[in-house]
Each structure stands twice: as structure tokens, then as C-alpha cells.
Amino acid sequence: MHNDPKITVLMPAYNAGSYIAEAIASVLKQSFTDFELLIVNDGSTDDTVQVINSFNDKRIVLISQENKGIAAALNVGLKAARAPYIARFDADDVCYPNRLKMQYDFITTYPEYSVIGSAADYMDVKGHFIFTYHPEAHLNEEIQQLNYTVCPFIHSSVFYKKEIITNNGGYNEHAYTFEDHFLWVNILKHEKACNLSLPLIKVRLNPNSITIDEKWRTRQFRDIKYTTLKTRSISAAEGNKLLEIGQKQHSPKIREGAYYALLAKKFLWNNYQPAKARENLKAVLQLNRFDWKSYALFALTFMPENFLLKLYTIMK
């Protein structure tokens, strides 16, 4: 095994058996080859480990732990990572072939940068394209001016200097579902960052993901989240409350409703396909026929695209 890879691709995995083969294959096909793929299996109960072990590539390193959550898995991975650069990646996403090369070339050409993200193509659970997401800010100056409520990066797209993150104590394990956003508000005031405008990954929207559309979170969850982001501090009690709320929302009905609602919004606001938006809103209403927001969105699907674009701009 290579003793000192230039990049550690850090992939936490929990019950990702349905998608992780595609994710791993996309990393192994990278045009940049001097990396280790460090997978932290976070107590999976499906066939995740068997799928990982079906690959015969010495660059794959597997660590298994009991289920402790994504932030804890990432911190374990950061300690074990042998490279000075970390490419974050999720077990249900897909890397485009030049992802690592482009980000490595950028950060070695411009070493004053510490964190590099990118745009991303979003796909549904079956891998069908939904829309291309462009981050709210690209240049460092724009990122620095973002409101604390806006997460500047797609976590699965980021490439960063390991020491910057470890020197900050790694990921905060109390920031349930927003450990990345909490990290950025704590480090970016002192670091230079940017987002590349080219999509370098495909992000899979997935009803089984721990991250659901925020509109489906409770008001208390959102209040705790944004208060802690504003103060850049979070207590164990706040973290426990977030976890408690999140676990109550793990029901298939809530996860599926959040998934279909998010697809509907993307097809309405980001990639104007009103028929597909209506199709997904019908799925939401089958799960919850009293969801008035879905009825309102359903009505909007009959409006012309120009009107919706203006409305979206005003709402943002």
C-alpha cells in the first residue's frame, strides 16, 4: 500500500448498500490516482461491508465502528487519514472522473486556499438528473459575506487541508445533521475558501438519508440550529435535543414526504418541469392529505415560468 497518498477520500457509510458500489466505482475511476479511499462504516446493519469488500483495490481502507453518527465517523476518519488533503464524499453520491484532479491542481496552485467546494448535479434516488446546484457564493470575498444561515458548501463536494480541520477540533458531534455548516461558521473567518463553478459530483436525494428538507424539521429544531450557528457554540444538551427530535422524525412517512416535497420544489423552482413537480406533490399528499403547503405549490405549478422565477427571486 502507498505510504503517503496525496489525497484521502473520506467516506462515512451507514446502511448504504444500495448505492455505495456506484460511489466507490466513481472514486476508483478518478483521473488522479494517488489517493486512499478511507471508508468509515458507522455500524451498518445491511450489506454495506460486503459491498465494500467486493472491491479489490489496495487504495480502499475500511474502518468499522458502532453507530455513532456521521460527525463521529468523520472524526475517526480524520485521525486515520494519511494524506494532507481530504476530499469529502458521501456513500450515495457519484464523483465525476476529474473531480480530484481539478481540486488538487487548484489547491496546490493556490496554496493560500484551505477549502474548495464545487457546484453539483442533483439526482433522484434512481439516479435521474433533477437540476444543477450552483452555490450561493463562489469567490472567497462572496463566501465571507454570506449570512451565517447559509451553508457555503455542498459537504460531499469539499476538498480541504486536513490540518485546518483537525486544528479546529474536527467536526462537532452535537451539531446533528449540520456538522459541516457548524464547522464552516467556526473556521472560515480565518481561512480562504472558494467554490468551483463546474459540477464535480452528483448528489443523490435519498429518502433514507439523515438529512431531510429543513421545512420538514420542527420549529424547535430550526431554532436550536440557527441559534447555535449564530453563536458558533453548541452544548451537549442542545445536541441531545436535536438528536431526540431527529430520531422522532425517522419514520418512513416523514422521510418520504420530505423527499417528494423536495423533488417537487426542485422541479418547480430550479428546473421548470411542472408536470414532474405535480407528480411528486401528489405523492406528498398521499402521505399527508392535510399538507396545505403542497396544495399551494400544486397551484403554482400552473403558473408560467417567468412568473415563478420572479416569485422565487423575491422569496430568496
Image: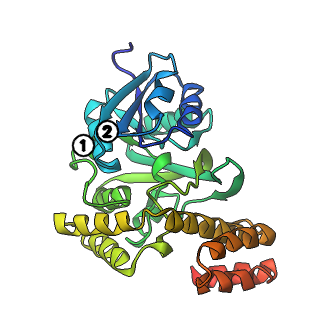
With 76 as the anchor, is 19 left or right in this view? right
190 in relation to 301, above or below: above
Q: Residue at x 74, y 85 (%)?
A: 299
229 in relation to 92, above or below: below
With 149 as the anchor, is 187 left or right in this view? left
253 in relation to 116, above or below: below
Which residue was labeled with disc 2? 162
Which of the labelled discs sits on residue 94, or is there none? Answer: none
Q: Secondary structure at mark 2?
A: helix
145 in relation to 70, above or below: below
Q: Is residue 269 visible?
A: no
- Mark 2 is surrounded, within 10 Å at the Cα level, by few (under 14), some (14 to 19) or many (20 or more) other residues, namely many
Marks 1 and 2 close (CB-CB < 8 Å): yes
Which residue was labeled with disc 1? 166
Q: Residue at x 46, y 22 (%)?
A: 53
Amino acid of disc 2 = Lys
- Mark 1 is surrounded, within 10 Å at the Cα level, by few (under 14), some (14 to 19) or many (20 or more) other residues, namely few
With 279 as the anchor, is 288 left or right in this view? left
Q: Secondary structure at mark 1?
A: helix
Q: Quadrant of the N terminus?
A: top left
Q: Is residue 17 visible?
A: yes
Give how far across and how far down residue 250 sits, in percent. Answer: 43, 62
Residue 263 occupies quadrant: bottom right
Give how far across and how far down residue 193 sits, in percent. Answer: 42, 52
Q: Looking at this view, is 142 or 1 the one in front?
A: 1
Q: Looking at this view, is 59 or 194 the one in front?
A: 59
Q: Looking at this view, is 191 or 241 the one in front?
A: 241
Amino acid of disc 1 = Thr
Q: Looking at this view, is 262 or 272 the one in front?
A: 262
Q: CA distance from mark 1 to mark 2?
A: 6 Å
Give how far across and how far down residue 290 sits, in percent. Answer: 59, 85
